[in-house]
Image (spheres, rainbow, N blue to C red):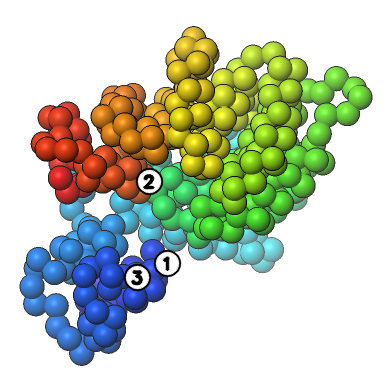
């Protein structure tokens, strides 16, 4: 893309951000005609201030718009930048599995090494180390694809497919965090097909969870609700005592379905799904990380808060947050806790307490900086806090805004 004129690059990134020319123009304070002329190369972009404004609206590094190699600054090392997104995209675009039909795979890492690498990637994600994860994902994807191809006709085929399915899910989750929703959907969809080859219903159930999350992020709310509820019904515990792993995956599908139902304002369905997840968590008997779900009573409470925020009931979200079991909450992994602080920050803004909202963002940032600094949603919440703060914002909030590139 480096050889493209700047107008074509603007059009490319506008399309990636799912913005119409009119929406893009409104956010820039320009006319739709102005945007159209810039993208067609009729109008030149000869002011750096305008280029920087465009980069800010599109949430890309200005160097990408100028066709230059992006300099990775130390303070952004914990986020996923556009260069890393493109490297992950390139890994997802590989179809080496097809080549295995015609010739042997030249190199494949041992599955024992792959298992360690995949476990490390999960932990990196759950500790919200998104920059480190992004730098590891392209190679991990290539290695997992190669291992899957190399073992296609051996007894190890299900194990190799299982690992590849997990890597696709890790990629899907990380990409969704930074707003790359289409790529997130692609990776999750890939995981469904691979999970079937792995012969693991629970892995396929979790893949459906990732698909549902990506669809919800894309605004495809009803399909998201349907996929979560349909697969949850298929994994629902029967008369026999269910495995803890089954309860965990089943419960997470219900929680994800509740988030979708909340997005469309269906409070009755939210209540039913949260009740089902609560029952599953009680039967599980505590908070566990089976299949990397972090499912249990505490995660159900986190989702009670999150669904309340989605329904616009910030007061209920805050009350639920204040009444939570603190021991259970502090035992959760950093990504879950920081994500919750972001949800509660939104809840506080809904009831007009921007000071407490700012405190929640700072709590999340202290715990897992990448969860706050790398997510577009956190940027929106911080912008809202700054806009509604009377007078000069507190020094810690102003400093966080400066570090995140959010205008005070």
Disc 1: which residue:
18
Give the percent coordinates (x, y) of residue 113.
Answer: 53, 33
Q: Residues within 10 Å of mark 1 (few under 14, many from 20)?
A: few
One can see residue 276 in this view? yes
**Residue named by callout 2:** 377
- How far separated are the C-alphas under marks 2 and 3? 18 Å
* Quarter placement of the C terminus: top left
- CB atoms of marks 3 and 1 within 8 Å: no
Q: Nearer the viewer, residue 235 or 396?
A: 396
Answer whether labels 2 and 1 touch (C-beta < 8 Å): no
Q: Nearer the viewer, mark 2 or mark 3?
A: 3
Residue at the far bottom: name it: 42
In the figure, 48 relative to 177: above or below?
below
Q: Nearer the viewer, residue 219 or 63?
A: 219
Label 1 residue SS: loop
Residue at 41 percent across and 53 percent down: it is: 179
């Amino acid at each position: 893309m480096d050889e493209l004129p700047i107008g074509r690059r603007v059009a490319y990134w506008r399309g990636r951000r799912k913005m119409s020319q009119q929406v893009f123009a409104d956010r820039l304070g320009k006319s739709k005609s102005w945007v159209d002329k810039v993208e067609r190369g009729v109008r030149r972009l000869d002011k750096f201030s305008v280029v920087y404004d465009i980069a800010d609206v599109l949430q890309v590094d200005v160097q990408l718009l100028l066709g230059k190699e992006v300099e990775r600054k130390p303070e952004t090392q914990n986020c996923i930048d556009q260069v890393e997104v493109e490297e992950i995209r390139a890994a997802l675009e590989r179809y080496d599995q097809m080549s295995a039909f015609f010739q042997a795979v030249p190199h494949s890492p041992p599955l024992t090494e792959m298992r360690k690498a995949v476990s490390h990637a999960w932990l990196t994600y759950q500790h919200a180390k998104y920059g480190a994860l992004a730098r590891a994902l392209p190679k991990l994807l290539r290695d997992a694809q190669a291992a899957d191809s190399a073992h296609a006709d051996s007894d190890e085929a299900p194990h190799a497919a299982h690992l590849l399915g997990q890597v696709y899910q890790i990629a899907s989750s990380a990409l969704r965090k930074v707003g790359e929703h289409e790529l997130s959907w692609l990776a999750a969809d890939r995981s469904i097909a691979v999970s079937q080859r792995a012969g693991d219903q629970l892995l396929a159930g979790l893949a459906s969870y990732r698909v549902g999350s990506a669809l919800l992020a894309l605004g495809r709310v009803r399909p998201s609700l349907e996929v979560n509820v349909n697969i949850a019904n298929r994994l629902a515990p029967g008369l026999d005592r269910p495995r803890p792993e089954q309860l965990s995956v089943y419960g997470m599908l219900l929680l994800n379905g509740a988030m979708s139902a909340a997005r469309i304002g269906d409070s009755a369905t939210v209540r039913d799904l949260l009740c089902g997840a609560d029952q599953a968590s009680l039967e599980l008997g505590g908070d566990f990380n089976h299949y990397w779900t972090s499912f249990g009573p505490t995660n159900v409470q986190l989702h009670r808060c999150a669904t309340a925020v989605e329904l616009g009931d910030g007061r209920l979200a805050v009350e639920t947050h204040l009444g939570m079991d603190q021991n259970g909450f502090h035992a959760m992994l950093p990504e879950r806790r920081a994500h919750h602080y972001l949800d509660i920050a939104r809840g506080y803004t809904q009831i007009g307490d921007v000071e407490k909202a700012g405190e929640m963002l700072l709590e999340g940032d202290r715990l897992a900086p990448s969860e706050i600094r790398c997510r577009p949603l956190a940027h929106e919440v911080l912008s809202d806090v700054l806009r509604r703060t009377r007078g000069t914002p507190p020094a810690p909030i102003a400093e966080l805004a400066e570090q995140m590139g959010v205008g005070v």
